[in-house]
């Protein structure tokens, strides 16, 4: 029995509506998956972004994973874990009692970090900014300092997965547009030696020895293995500008 033109037209409309609904659902699911993947690349720890702020050293961690490959964790980290504070004057070329404002400038284009105290450049260091995740630009404040922490994220299928125990001398930063839950920070990197070129998932990498100097110089003053800012002891301002080179 043949269907009337009116019935065929109605069925065609229902089919189009159903197809549109299925496409919309599929697009929504795909968008959520992409957001989830993107957040993994933009956070220091993709499980909860910031899951552990204890600053404690993890014992018996000999292997790390970077870009899906196993790499050894240097034994020098164990030695630094036993030292609570630097030797007085060793990492602070300007007196800690100075009232001159401290500011950290990070030039993404040049892949350089400049630490200023007043009108003096205290440190100039090569960095590695985001290659597999964008490093944000703007003005930020340090809000937490951890002597050690674990960072984990990336994507195994894309070959960007990382699981790094005992990341040294981390200073997390934030702004009103980039909240602390995004997990951006400046920290030492023992898993590569390619400073001066983009190599991170969004954070700012420094050589561990450079990260240590900056960590003890910047505010707030280090109180132990973890230090949080307060109203009375705010964090150093960080200014990030420029564009990360595409390499």
Image: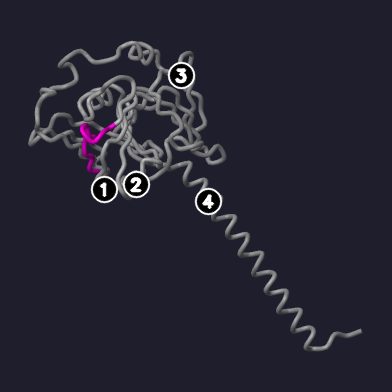
**Mark sitting earlier along the chain (3/4):** 4
Q: Is residue 9 above or below residue 45?
A: below
Q: Answer few, some or many: residues within 10 Å of disc 4's Cα (few below 14, many 20 plus, some between 14 and 19).
A: few
Name the residue located 56 percent from the left edge and 50 percent from the top edge.
33
Mark number displayed over residue 120:
none
**Mark sitting earlier along the chain (1/3):** 3
Query: Looking at the image, is mark 2 or mark 4 nearer the viewer?
Result: 2
Could you say whether the residue bearing mark 3 is in a helix, strand or loop?
strand
Q: Answer few, some or many: residues within 10 Å of disc 3's Cα (few below 14, many 20 plus, some between 14 and 19).
A: few
According to the image, label 4 marks what residue?
34
**Mark sitting earlier along the chain (1/2):** 1
Q: Answer few, some or many: residues within 10 Å of disc 1's Cα (few below 14, many 20 plus, some between 14 and 19).
A: some
What whole-number distance in Å separates the C-alpha atoms at marks 2 and 4?
20 Å
According to the image, label 3 marks what residue?
72
Mark number displayed over residue 178:
2
Q: Is residue 203 left or right of residue 151?
A: left
Q: How many callouts does the rendering have?
A: 4
User: In the image shown, does 110 or 48 lie closer to the viewer?
Assistant: 48
| Residue 243 placement (x, y as % from top left) | 29, 48
Check contact, mark 1 vs mark 3: CB within 8 A.
Answer: no
What whole-number distance in Å separates the C-alpha atoms at marks 1 and 2?
9 Å
What whole-number distance in Å separates the C-alpha atoms at marks 3 and 4?
32 Å
Query: Looking at the image, is mark 3 or mark 2 nearer the viewer?
Result: 2
Stretch of the chain drawn in magenta = 229-241
User: In the image shown, does 22 or 98 lie closer to the viewer?
Assistant: 98
Check contact, mark 3 vs mark 2: CB within 8 A.
Answer: no
Q: Answer few, some or many: residues within 10 Å of disc 2's Cα (few below 14, many 20 plus, some between 14 and 19).
A: some
Could you say whether the residue bearing mark 4 is in a helix, strand or loop?
helix
């Amino acid at each position: 029995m043949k269907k009337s033109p009116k019935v065929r037209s109605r069925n065609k409309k229902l089919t189009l509506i159903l197809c549109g609904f299925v496409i919309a659902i599929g697009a929504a699911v795909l968008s959520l998956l992409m957001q989830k993947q993107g957040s993994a690349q933009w956070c220091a720890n993709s499980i909860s972004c910031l899951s552990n702020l204890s600053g404690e050293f993890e014992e018996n961690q000999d292997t790390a994973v970077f870009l899906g490959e196993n790499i050894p964790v240097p034994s020098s980290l164990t030695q630094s874990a036993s030292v609570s504070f630097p030797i007085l004057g060793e990492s602070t070329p300007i007196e800690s009692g100075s009232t001159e404002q401290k500011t950290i400038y990070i030039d993404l284009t040049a892949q350089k970090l400049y630490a200023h105290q007043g009108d003096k450049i205290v440190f100039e260091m090569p960095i590695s900014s985001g290659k597999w995740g964008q490093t944000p630009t703007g003005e930020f404040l340090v809000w937490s300092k951890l002597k050690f922490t674990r960072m984990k994220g990336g994507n195994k299928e894309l070959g960007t997965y990382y699981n790094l125990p005992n990341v040294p001398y981390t200073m997390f930063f934030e702004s009103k547009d980039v909240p602390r839950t995004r997990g951006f920070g400046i920290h030492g990197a023992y898993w590569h030696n390619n400073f001066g070129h983009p190599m991170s998932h969004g954070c700012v990498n420094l050589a561990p020895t450079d990260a240590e100097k900056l960590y003890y110089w910047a505010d707030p003053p280090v109180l132990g293995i973890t230090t949080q800012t307060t109203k009375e002891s705010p964090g150093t301002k960080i200014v990030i500008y420029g564009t990360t080179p595409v390499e």
